[in-house]
Image (tube, rainbow, N blue to C red):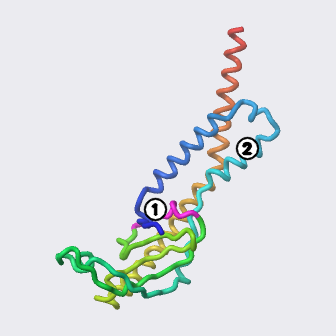
């Protein structure tokens, strides 16, 4: 179980820039033999597979609701109360199936999303993402309504991020072709310089 700040930890444009830079570095380290070999297509395919970005699939429509009892510090449950006293509360949890690696769920899409409610966690072992509402005992209807509004916003953000990642992936071929062309030109220039010096 790992706490996560969904769609708000880092910017998608920054991720794309970082990925593009890593792609440039990778192609820059290729030996010249790669460009002369018949296996260049295999190297390019491997490069595309490595740098293709994919947002994990979250099934927001097939979530399940669970109420569990937890022992929480009273000061967390009711701010201003004395520390050291614990209280048993019913915590509402919504669990959603998740497929894929979770670190990309922290990426912020270009569409605005409302502030998240509850505490969000990923569970890579059970392939789930879930949210806990410790204030459920105090305001059950308010919590459920806030969750439903939050989920519709998250669905829009998830869809927008998928589209942005697909746009980036669609440009991978062109980026790789440009990098290869640049690298070939540099290698040719270097070869000509060596010939002139000898």
* Residue 96 x %, y %: 52, 78
Rendered residue at 43%/56% (across/down):
11
The residue under the point 21% across, 76% down is 79
Q: Residue pushed farthest bottom?
A: 141
Q: Residues within 10 Å of mark 2 (few under 14, many from 20)?
A: some
In the image, residue 167 lies at what x, y percent?
58, 58
Quote the CA–CA distance across marks 1 and 2: 30 Å
User: Would you call the spot at circle 1 few (<14 residues within 10 Å), some (14-19), or many (20 or more)?
Assistant: some
Magenta stretch contains residue 140: no
Kindly identify which residue carries mark 1.
Answer: 106
Q: With respect to residue 54, does 136 lie above or below?
A: below
Q: How many marks?
A: 2
At x 68%, y 9%, the residue is: 197
Pointer 1 or 2: first along the chain: 2
Q: Are marks 1 and 2 in contact (CB under 8 Å)?
A: no
Say whether residue 109 is magenta: yes
Q: Which residue is mark 2?
A: 43
Q: Which residues are magenta?
A: 101-112
Q: Secondary structure at mark 1?
A: helix
Q: On screen, 168 above or below 134?
A: above
Percent of width and height locating residue 166: 59, 60
Corner quadrant of residue 40: top right
Q: Position of residue 171 (x, y in %)?
A: 61, 52
Nearer-the-camera pick, 42 or 133? 133
For the view shown, which residue lies furthest in the top direction? 198
């Amino acid at each position: 179980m790992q706490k996560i700040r969904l769609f708000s930890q880092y910017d998608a444009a920054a991720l794309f820039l970082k990925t593009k830079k890593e792609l440039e570095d990778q192609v820059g380290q290729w030996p010249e033999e790669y460009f002369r070999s018949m296996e260049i297509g295999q190297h390019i395919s491997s490069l595309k597979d490595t740098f293709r970005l994919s947002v994990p699939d979250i099934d927001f429509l097939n979530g399940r609701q669970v109420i569990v009892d937890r022992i929480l510090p009273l000061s967390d449950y009711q701010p201003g109360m004395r520390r050291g006293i614990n209280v048993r509360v019913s915590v509402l949890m919504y669990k959603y199936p998740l497929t894929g690696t979770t670190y990309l769920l922290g990426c912020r899409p270009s569409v605005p999303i409302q502030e998240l409610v509850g505490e969000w966690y990923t569970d890579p072992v059970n392939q789930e993402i879930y949210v806990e509402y410790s204030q459920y005992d105090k305001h059950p209807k308010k919590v459920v309504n806030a969750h439903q509004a939050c989920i519709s916003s998250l669905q829009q953000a998830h869809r927008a991020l998928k589209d942005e990642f697909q746009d980036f992936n669609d440009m991978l071929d062109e980026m790789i072709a440009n990098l290869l062309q640049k690298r070939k030109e540099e290698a040719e220039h270097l070869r000509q310089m060596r010939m002139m010096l000898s």
